[in-house]
Image: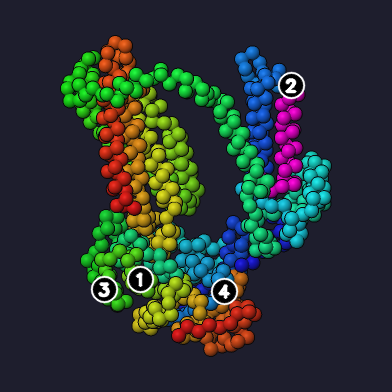
Amino acid sequence: MATDELIRVEHLTKIYERGDIVALKDISFTVKRGEFLVLIGLSGSGKSTLLRCINRLIEPTSGRILFDGIDVTKASAKQLRQLRRRMAMIFQHFNLVKRSSVLTNVLAGRLGYVHPAASAIHRFPKEDIDAAIANLERVGIPEQIYKRADELSGGQQQRVGIARALMQRPDLLMADEPVSALDPATAHSVMQYLEQMNREDGVTVIASLHFLSLARRYGTRILALKDGEIVFEGLPAEIDGKKFKEIYGEEAEEVEVR
Amino acid sequence: MKRPRKSKSGSRPLALRLAALRPRIAAFLLDWASWGYIAYGVMYLLNKYWYLRYVDFYGRLTLPSWGWPLVILATLELTLLSHAFVQTIGLSLFGLRVLGPDLRRIPLRARLRRFIVQHAVLLAQPVALFRDRPGGLLLHDSPTTGRMHLVARVKDEMPPEPPEKVWRTYRGIFLAGLLGLTFWLGWKITTINLQMLIERIGKSGHIWRDLFTPHFTYLTEYVNERGRLYSITYHMMETIFMAFFATVTGAAIAFPLSFLGARNIMGFNKLGWLVYSVMRLLFNVFRSIESILMAVLFAVWVGFGNPFAGAMALLLHTVAALGKLYSEQVEGIDPGPLEAITATGARRWQVVVYGVIPQIIPSYLAFTLYRWDINIRMATIIALVGGGGIGTLLFYFKNEVGRLPDAWNQVGAIVVSIVVVVWALDYISARVREKIG
């Protein structure tokens, strides 16, 4: 099925049983191939939950998610692993294994592909190791390869996260507030790697971002969530002062990140 | 984030309503138990000092047939009273507070009304549990202005309160009282007697003198009284290797088991929960049986005085204790890397190999060394029940007191050897742990 639609989310609802919290309320949208979709919204508006429902790190309560025509919500354990290989993810706090080397962290991106027994004793095929080195070069930190992940700065750690995602050769990259833990200058360099993946490798990107200025600069389309519901869907340019107040509340003021 | 309660749209299922009651029940039981403890303490002390008539011939506490219901009723009443009027230990521990509609403390009069109404609706209460009303689940909540709130739920809307000084609150004073009572009871029950401690100081004097003038006659020399006893060095080697074997093998067995006993690894489906619960139960059961008790069993099994028995007992206890400690470490790891590795399409065990193990290795090593310290110390006395090792020699000479003129000096030599070895190994493991930490 080669449509231009990569993801279709239908009536997605997530209720956290503990505490009766409705994180997502009947959400439906689609993502086209090659898009750079930006999710915006306040903390707790459901952005992270939405991303994690797509690769089922969090089990949706109801609704359907189609990835390339395959229903993720009904996938068996094996199918799910195969789907997850095609959707890479990077995280706000990088989620690297801090005590492992950068190389091991990057190679972890291949775990869905390699022979399971070989990976148990940390053996990876030569081409995977070559690819890991190439990807680290691509994100500009080849010299850090044998260092422990926690010796790196925040920006460098997020680049290791990107290299790990690149190892999966994904169709989709989900970025959960990838730059909120970084300073503005580093944030832009990290965002540019995402943009590069999107433009050059044709990877569809869904990124949740805190700053509207970043969303405007990098997103091709914006989806705004508020209290688990979609309150805006459209082009970055369409968000004016009024829309902004709708999304972030009356008291909010826009802050620029340059 | 908004928290829409389901009760607005429809009634919640009974299970959820009962779950909401759980902290209240727990708080009530805890406070009741503490009043029960006080009642026990008071009765014990009354018996101890005034020999009240409710003590039978053997000194056991007895009450007339109406006594027990009276005690139960009185403690229940005290619990209800304290729940209505003050913030008890149970209420604070389970995050509950009685607050008015404006989320402030309710006046004294309302508290009294609450206390009385609580009695009146006691029988109707079970019926109320099956009705879901927005006002609350408990009948006595509605007619009084007060209502029991989960503090965590209403924290953000509560008016600010100045921090209170714990020693001036009810629960601070109550807790101090409980501690005082426990000390008093403990003093009486264990028959602590300082006078005796001082008066009879001379009784053990010569033993101290002999212990501090050790005779190292058998340090390396062969003893062989019964064909089983050898030199101090020989038995010390037995002891060290007994502990070493138990620690290394125990760690190797506990390592894989610890993942089965960790909630964040196993808690994904029903089978996982079952395995987790069984593992935790086994860990807890075998951990609570001290290795010296297990050695009793193994000494009968493989032979009295055989170090094999001691090694097996230590091994079993080590597996359980390390298993528990290890699993807690696994549960305490940063979940971020796990979700990142899961998201790459890795299998569950690959997540363990790449995400969990690197995070826990340092604390595993530290715990294993700590366990090695414990095992060494335990191995020195496990011979008390026939577990083998240096203790065999120690208890042999201790039993020769009276037959052998320098028995206590021999014991002293063994004690000194034990101190030296334990101290040296402790020192080494402490240094290694420092390096790891």
Whole-percent x and y of residue B204? Answer: 39, 19
Q: Does residue B110 appear to the left or right of B194 in the view shown?
A: right
Seen in the picture, residue A190 relative to B314 is either above or below; the reply is below
Discs 2 and 4 carry the same chain letter:
no
Residue depth check, mark 2 versus mark 4: number of the one nearer the observer: 2
In front of the other: A197 or A148: A148
What residue did someone put label 1 on?
Answer: A153
Contact between marks 3 and 2 (CB within 8 A): the answer is no
Q: Position of residue A181 (x, y in %)?
A: 44, 72
First-in-chain label (4 vs 1): 4
Q: Nearer the viewer, residue B171 or A55?
A: B171
The N terminus of chain A sits in image quarter:
bottom left
Q: Give SS at disc 1.
A: loop
Q: Secondary structure at mark 2?
A: loop
| Tags 3 and 2 both on a single chain | no
Q: What chain does badge 3 belong to?
A: A
- Earlier in the chain: of badge 4 and badge 3, it is 4
Amino acid at pointer 2: Ser
Q: Which residues are magenta?
A: B66-91
Measure how far apart labels 2 and 4 are at the Cα level: 65 Å
Secondary structure under tag 4 reads loop
Check disc 3 and give the amino acid type.
Pro
Q: CA distance from mark 3 to mark 1?
A: 14 Å
Disc number at residue A42? Answer: 4
The amino acid beneath tag 1 is: Ser
Up-down relation of residue A69 to residue B171 (above or below): below
Identify the residue at horizontal 34%, vertical 58% (top origin): B354
Disc 2 target residue: B65
Q: CA distance from mark 3 to mark 2?
A: 84 Å
